[in-house]
Each structure stands twice: as C-alpha cells, then as structure tokens.
Amino acid sequence: QVQLVESGGGSVQAGGSLRLSCAASGRTFSLYVMGWFRQAPGKEREFVAAISRGGTTNYADSVKGRFTISSDNAKNTVYLQMNSLKPEDTAVYYCAGDRNSIIASPVYDYWGQGTQVTVSS
C-alpha cells in the first residue's frame, strides 16, 4: 500500500501563486507515475498534471504554461507549482499515484485526501 498526504493549499487572489506538496510513504517503489487532479463543486474530477519516475510530464491544456509539476524521488515527494492562478482554478486538489503509465483519467491506484485551493477575483 501507498499513502499520499497533500499540503500547501489555501486562499489566494487571482494572479497569485501556490505550491502544493504530496508526500508518499509505504511501498513507494511500486509507483511509476504521480499526478494531480482537481474537483470543483458540482463538477467531475479532472486531470491537472502528472510526472513519471523518469521525469516525463504531462499537463492539461488549461494549466499549461502556468503550472509546473516536479518531483524529488529521494524524498518521495511531488510538487505542483501554480502560478498566475485564476478563479476557475478553485477546487479541491488531489494527489494520486499509479503503478503504470501516465494517464489523464482519475483511475489511479492511490489517492490523497485532497487540499482546498481557493482563488478569489
């Protein structure tokens, strides 16, 4: 089993920045990819970004150029740097881990509890 714990959410004004962190513990050697998803009230959970153990990244079109995903394999931690935040970025952000390839669907093996990000106009 793998446990994922997110941190770094909060409230920020439009145009501001936040950095989310996701610390993994347990059988982390089994993870091939780590990703971030988000879910706004009344909407489905959507893909934000993902990074493979080898460093390959993938982003949703809505965040390209504004968000950056990175990882510190030694610390088993993944980060999501979010710049130029918009009100439509408001959502609960979830960290996820999977044992297989990067996928943009919310079918990952492991999930964190989520952290709230609120962007005000």
Image (cartoon, grey):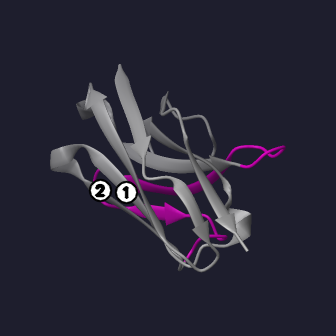
Kind of residue indicated by mark 2: Ser
Front position among marks 2 and 1: 1
In the rendered image, residue 115 lying in the magenta stretch gets the answer no
In the rendered image, residue 41 lying in the magenta stretch gets the answer yes
Q: Which residue is mark 2?
A: 71
Q: Residue at x 64, y 76 (%)?
A: 14
- Locate the N terminus by quadrant: top left
Which numbered circle lies on residue 54?
A: none
Q: Is residue 69 left or right of residue 60?
A: left
> Residue 33 location in percent, x, y?
39, 45
Q: Residues within 10 Å of mark 1 (few under 14, many from 20)?
A: many
Q: Is residue 120 left or right of residue 20?
A: right
Q: Which image quarter: residue 54?
A: bottom left
> Residue 107 location in percent, x, y?
60, 34
**Magenta part, dominant SS:** loop
Mark 1 element type: strand
> Residue 58 location in percent, x, y?
49, 63
Q: Which residue is mark 1?
A: 79
Question: Of residues 112 and 62, which is closer to you in this image?
Answer: 112
Q: Residue at x 62, y 52 (%)?
A: 47
- Mark 2 or 1, nearer chain start: 2
Q: Residues within 10 Å of mark 2 (few under 14, many from 20)?
A: some
Kind of residue indicated by mark 1: Tyr
Question: Of residues 104 and 42, which is closer to you in this image?
Answer: 42
Question: Which range is magenta?
Answer: 40-64
